[in-house]
Image (tube, helix red, strand yellow):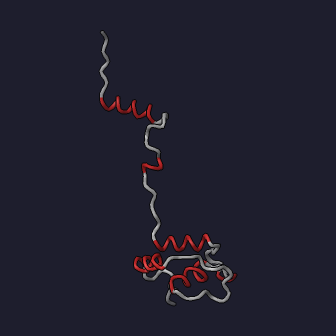
Amino acid sequence: MYQIRISRLALCTVLLGLAAPLGLAAPASQAVPAKVPGPCAQITAACKQAGFIEGDYKTGNGLQVDCIDPIMRGKPQPPKAKLPLPPVSPQLIAACKAKHPGFGQPKPPK
């Protein structure tokens, strides 16, 4: 009888190569967990989803001036703001302030 010797590494490689096309291997989406954005990034994303645009402060749709600043300060929007603020939980605002205390605050003049 004829015998073929094969290493364990080669055998595993062949088996995994066969398992992937059959759908037996773990999907790529499960292999790497999705990174959850931080609290400040979530606030920024909420403002962008509400239609606020970075640098569009002159028309009342500014991301920083018309959305992030009022949310982080707990103050009303400027009178020229055209879009309503998105709903953001107080817990998310507190978490953002704890992580980045100066987020949403105007930069001091030089």
Q: Nearer the viewer, residue 106 or 87?
A: 87
Q: Where is residue 56 shown, x and y percent of the image?
A: 65, 78
Q: Is residue 38 above or below residue 35?
A: below
| 43 sits left or right of 14 in the view | right
What's the residue at 52%, 74% (across, down)?
43
Q: Where is residue 78 shown, x and y percent of the image?
A: 63, 88
Q: Where is residue 45 shown, x and y percent of the image?
A: 55, 70
What's the residue at 61%, 69% (across, down)?
49
Number of numbered discs: 0
Q: Where is residue 95 shown, x and y percent of the image?
A: 42, 76
The picture quadrant where one finds residue 66 is bottom right
The picture quadrant where one finds residue 64 is bottom right
Quadrant of the frame with the N terminus: top left
What's the residue at 50%, 76% (across, down)?
89
What's the residue at 59%, 76% (across, down)?
86
Q: Nearer the viewer, residue 85 or 8?
A: 85
Q: Nearer the viewer, residue 23 or 55?
A: 23
Q: Is residue 89 above or below residue 19?
A: below
